[in-house]
Every structure is written in structure tokens, then in C-alpha cells.
Amino acid sequence: MKRTLPLLAILTSSTFAELPVHADRTEWLGYFIGWDGRKYDYGVGSEDLEGLLHPKKGKTRTSHKEVKLNFVVQEEIKGKWVTRRPISEDPFITTAKEAILNSKKPVDFTVTVTGDTKVEFVHAVSSKGVMVKPKVVEKKTENPIRVGLKFSLRAFHSIKSDTEEEKIEKAIRSDVLIGKRLKDGKKVKVKFSDTQVDLNDEKHFAAGMSELEIKSKQYGSDSFVIEQGSEKIGVLEVEAKSEIYRGLTIYWWANNDKLGERDCFVNFGVE
């Protein structure tokens, strides 16, 4: 998916109040950072701070199969978690002087949200995939906050509402979700064809996960994986539509007491 965003000015101070942007390569237009891997590529938009991971077939991005990533800061207000949005003026800063492609060093940006909470997200890429490490830089509210990532996975197959059940079963026969339960470390497999499953009941992932793997025809012989730095630094939660094959939303929430520690990060990618 291309980004058609305006060119942003590059400032000359040690931190930059607007994120620099790629403007010289068509596939990276509108991106602030990007990594071009063998099985997938991943980048973050300079204007919206939205991450996009594109699985690849050969050297080409597969169409309509991207995973969208959002950086989330929530504040607890009157007993409910409320997502805080970036402030309207200079919401993002970075120490990077220019847009970066295939950086071998960590790349940071800091977002300021309503309520004047500032959170830094550091990106790095290794053989284990993309690593994102968050840290709260400044917190003025007295309310509790939480920091995390939201992964939005599109429908895994192009199945229309009037498609025959037999054809649906054939399309999703080999698709599975495998989660490592946080409460006991047990790996639990769920078939996409099990349309009656409740992913958040006690038999499955009511207490969350530390790892997640999704095997689907759309990834060929590979899998989309998410894994946190260690079991105690956070939790993975999953939300499914009426049927898993119609799409998933996965949240990773960092443990507030662990934010900024060495192993408080999450890895994700296609492998």
C-alpha cells in the first residue's frame, strides 16, 4: 500500500518536531522509516505514525494482505480505558535527521497525546523480526495509563456472504492460530474452521498470551508471528470478528512496571 502524503519539512534541531519522509522511492513514499526484508517489508508513516507490514511473494508485496499497526496510549478515566489521540500541534518528534531505510541502528520517535503524556517508541530490526520498545517519557495526569500496540489483520480470504459453506471450509481448512497462554505457558491451537470458538474463554486465552502464531494460505508456507521479550513484561490479547477468517485485532499491552526495562519489547514479522 502506497502512502500519498505531503512532504514534511526537516528541521535542524537535535530533535525534530515533524518526522522526515521518504520522497524518492515510489514504494516508500510517505514513510518515515522502513525495512525491506526477504519475506516482508515494514514501514511507519511520517504523518499518521501508522505502521504497515506487507508480506511478500518473491520480491513483490502481496496485495490486500498487509497488517496495520497503531501505537496506542490509553488513560483510565472513571473506570474506563480511553484512547488518547496525538495532540494537534507538533505531536511527533524524533532524533533522526532524515527518513531512514534499512537502518541497522535503532530508530526512535516520541508521541505526545492529549493529557500531555509523552511516550517514546524505539524500532529495531533483527533476524527475529521488527522490535518495538516503548517507554513513558513524561506523564502529567494522575490517572493510570497503559501503552501498547494494536495489530489489525484483514480478512484472510475473499469470501462473500453468499459463498457456500463447503467452499469456505475448503479455503480455510489449513488455517490455524496458535497462542501460548500466559497463565500456564501451554500452546493452544485454534482452527479457523471452528466458527463456534470463543478465543477469550478459560479454555483458550482469557488470561492473554505471551506468543502468537498465525498460519494461513495467505502467508504461503510462512506464518505471521508476535512474541514479547519475556513472559512477565506484558500481555497479548485477541479480538475476532464473528469468524476468525474474517479478520483479527490483536493488542499488546506493556506491563507498566516493566516499561523501559531491557526486555520490555515485542517482536513481530513473517517467518
Image (cartoon, rainbow, N blue to C red):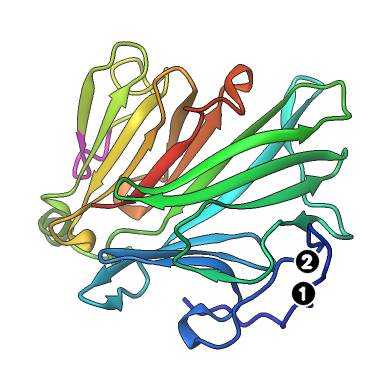
- Depth check, front residue: 65 or 100: 100
Q: Name the side, left or right, on which 142 lies relative to 92.
A: right
- Depth check, front residue: 91 or 215: 91
Select label 1 or label 2 by which is in front: 1
Find out whether residue 51 is within the magenta segment: no
Q: Name the side, left or right, on which 13 lies relative to 47.
A: right
Kind of element beneath mark 1: loop
Residue at the (44%, 31%) spot, across then down: 236
Q: Is residue 267 above or below residue 19?
A: above
Percent of width and height locating residue 138:
81, 33
Residue at the (64%, 60%) spot, across then down: 49
Residue numbers of the magenta segment? 190-196
Q: Is residue 83 above or below residue 35?
A: above
Q: What label sits on residue 18 in the rendered view?
A: 2
Q: Are marks 1 and 2 in contact (CB under 8 Å)?
A: yes
Kind of element beneath mark 2: loop
Percent of width and height locating residue 61:
33, 75
The residue that disc 1 covers is 10
Percent of width and height locating residue 149:
55, 42
